[in-house]
Amino acid sequence: MKDSYSFRADGFEARWFEGTSHRDKAIIWMHGSSMNEKRCIADSEYLRAAGYSVLVLGFYFWKGMSKKMRGIPVEYVERAVAELKRSGFEYIGIHGISSGAAYALLCASLIPDIRLALSVCPFDYVVEEPRIFGRPTGRSWFSYRGKDYPCSLFTGQREKGFFGSLREYRRQDTERRNEFLRSLYENATLTEESRIKVENMHADVLLIAPERDNEWPSPTAVRRMERKLQEAGYPYRVQAVVYPHASHLLGTYPPESWKKAFPAERKWPEECDASRRDCFEREFRFLEEWRI
């Protein structure tokens, strides 16, 4: 495979790193919101160092791509999977963090050739594009076959706007004052149409979240997805892990300056570092047992 793929030439934007071992396995690796190409390549290094072939995919925010979480096509991943298959890879997996984790799960639910999903700090519903200034747009984060995927609406923010919702949240007598962003998702109108149908995947799946995720309710989503897969009699391997002392920075090598923005990192610095190490180790163990 070639080193670099461009949207204009190939229908997706990615950087390819050939593995030194596990030559039948390839991982499509994605980061979360507002992560540029440099950061994505840096944080995916742990898999590349372990010998896995990794296709670092830009689904938005890379140079030349949209800076908005709006209408991001599932077809980016679909085309990347087709390229990996043409190159002879039998085992194709996908990895995502935060919004990238939601995108990875949605893609795995729609693309049967994805046979493993590593999902760190995910959400299990597609939501509308949030806005700081003005009301939300009603536009879905993701699209498929040229149409927006059904999305959940930020009901509270639609009524009061971002800053109105923030003012109301700050008036609450709560110990969780640093979880305003999480509250927007907790108060969203979740519908069955906007739910990511994880039970439709044909993949081993690892779901990981921090209990006190102040960005969005990823631990609730992980437990909800685990229950849905159990109820569906899901025939593939499922592991779900919720760390009691960790932050939304799971699955990354965050600079010290980033940690200051996350309450859990300030309150439990050693435990958060330990959870990060364990998260990486769990990914490796899960990959080693990948036999589909």
Image (cartoon, rainbow, N blue to C red):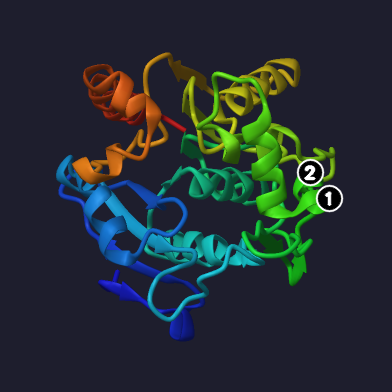
Count residues near mark 1 (Cα–Cα under 10 Å), then give few for <14, some for 14-19, many for 20+: few
Amino acid type, callout 2: Gly
In depth, the one of 255 and 102 nearer the eye is 255
* Disc 2 + disc 1, Cβ < 8 Å: yes
Residue 56 lies left or right of residue 68; in this view the side is: left
What kind of element bears circle 1?
helix
Left or right for 56, reference 92: left
Residue placed at 35% from the left, 49% from the top? 26
Residue at 49% x, 50% y is 100
Q: Which mark is residue 176?
A: none
Disc 1 designates what residue? Answer: 159
Residue at x 74%, y 54% (from the top left corner): 161
Number of marks in picture:
2
Coordinates of residue 27 in the picture (x, y in percent): 37, 48
Q: Position of residue 198 (x, y in %)?
A: 67, 35
Q: Is residue 120 above or below residue 224?
A: below
Nearest to the observer: residue 244 or residue 236? 244
- The percent position of residue 79, horizontal first and vertical second, equals 53, 67
Rounded to the nearest angstrom, the CA distance separating label 2 from label 1 is: 5 Å
Between 37 and 51, the one lying in front of the other is 37
Three-letter amino acid code at disc 1?
Glu
Q: How would you rate the neighbour count of disc 2 (Cα within 10 Å): few for under 14, some for 14-19, many for 20 or more? A: some
Position in image of residue 76 (x %, y %): 54, 66
The residue where tag 2 is placed is: 156
Q: Is residue 44 left or right of residue 7?
A: left
Label 2 SS: helix
In front: 94, or 102?
A: 102
In the picture shown, does residue 165 fall above or below 148? Answer: above
- Farthest residue toward the front? 171
